[in-house]
Structures are given as structure tokens and as C-alpha cells.
Image (tube, rainbow, N blue to C red):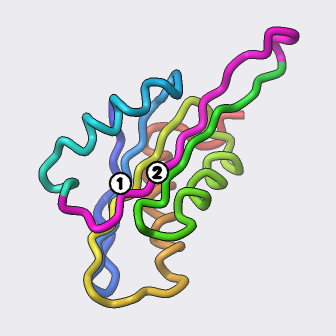
Amino acid sequence: PIYSSDRLHDRKSIFVAHASMLPKDTMFPLFLDVLTASPKLKKATHCMYAYRTSQCSTTSISKSKFITGQHDGGESGSGNHLARLLDVTGCENTVVVVSRWYGGVQLGGDRWRRITEVAKEALGKGGFLNQK
């Protein structure tokens, strides 16, 4: 399943996030294709994402290494911001995608708060937060 945040409106911009389980990083392109098949999401000005998957180490079952990926989608630094959020909150085998429809008003630092807010909401709805 894909878990979605509510739409968040701020000064004519709209933010929405989607989160899902991602067992393998190789499954990400398929997930993104399914998600962006929506005509509404195709019209988003920005589509930023991050994923974090774990792979058990061959030398120790208790140690895992993580494969991560991110993309800014035209919102400079946002992919890294989302990747850090997945790391800090302990998300594993998870992907989060945030879409923004730019409303013509620059939000400054508030855009980071909005991106984080909708991402956390979608991750929370899916039960992905604090999986450590």
C-alpha cells in the first residue's frame, strides 16, 4: 500500500507526500512509475524523493548496510533533506516522495518545514517511523 499525507496549503503552494515499503532499491523505478501515473501528480512542479533499504551483511546477521537514493526534483537540497529524515527517524525499507505545486510565492525556509511535515505524516500513517 501507499500511504498519503493530507494536502498542505501554504501561500498558494500545495504539498503532499506518499510513503511505502520498499524491500529492494531495484523496485524503486516501478514504484515511481506507479505513483507518477496519476495525471494530478504529473502536473506537480517539484517531485522530490528519498529511499532507504537495508541489506544484511554477509559476515554478520546483526549488522545491516543501507542502500539510499534521493532526488531533488528541482527543489535544491530536498532529496538530501528527505534522506536525512529517513535516517534520523530509523526508517528501513521505505520510500517517501513529496510533490509540490508551486503557487508563485517563495516560501524561504518554510518550504523545508512543509516538506518535512507532509513526509512525516505519510511515514507515520504507514507505521514507518522509529523502526529501530
- Classify residue 131 as left or right of residue 100: right
122 relative to 23, above or below: below
Residue 54 found in image quarter: top right
Is residue 6 on the magenta stretch? no
Rendered location of residue 103, percent (x, y): 26, 82
**Residue at 42%, 42% in the rendered image:** 19
Amino acid marked by disc 2: Tyr
Query: Quick one: label 1, few (<14), some, or many (20+) residues within 10 Å?
Result: many
Q: Mark 2 points at which residue?
A: 49
Is residue 48 on the magenta stretch? yes
- Classify residue 130 as left or right of residue 94: right
- Classify residue 98 as left or right of residue 22: left
Rendered location of residue 127, percent (x, y): 51, 37
**Residue at 39%, 88% in the rendered image:** 106
Secondary structure under badge 1?
A: loop
Q: What stretch is highlighted in magenta?
A: 43-62
128 relative to 105, above or below: above
Rendered location of residue 75, percent (x, y): 45, 69
Secondary structure under badge 2?
A: strand
Rendered location of residue 47, percent (x, y): 36, 58
Q: Which mark, by number, is residue 5?
A: 1
Amino acid marked by disc 1: Ser
**Residue at 80%, 9% in the rendered image:** 58
Residue 28 found in image quarter: top left
Name the residue furthest left.
39
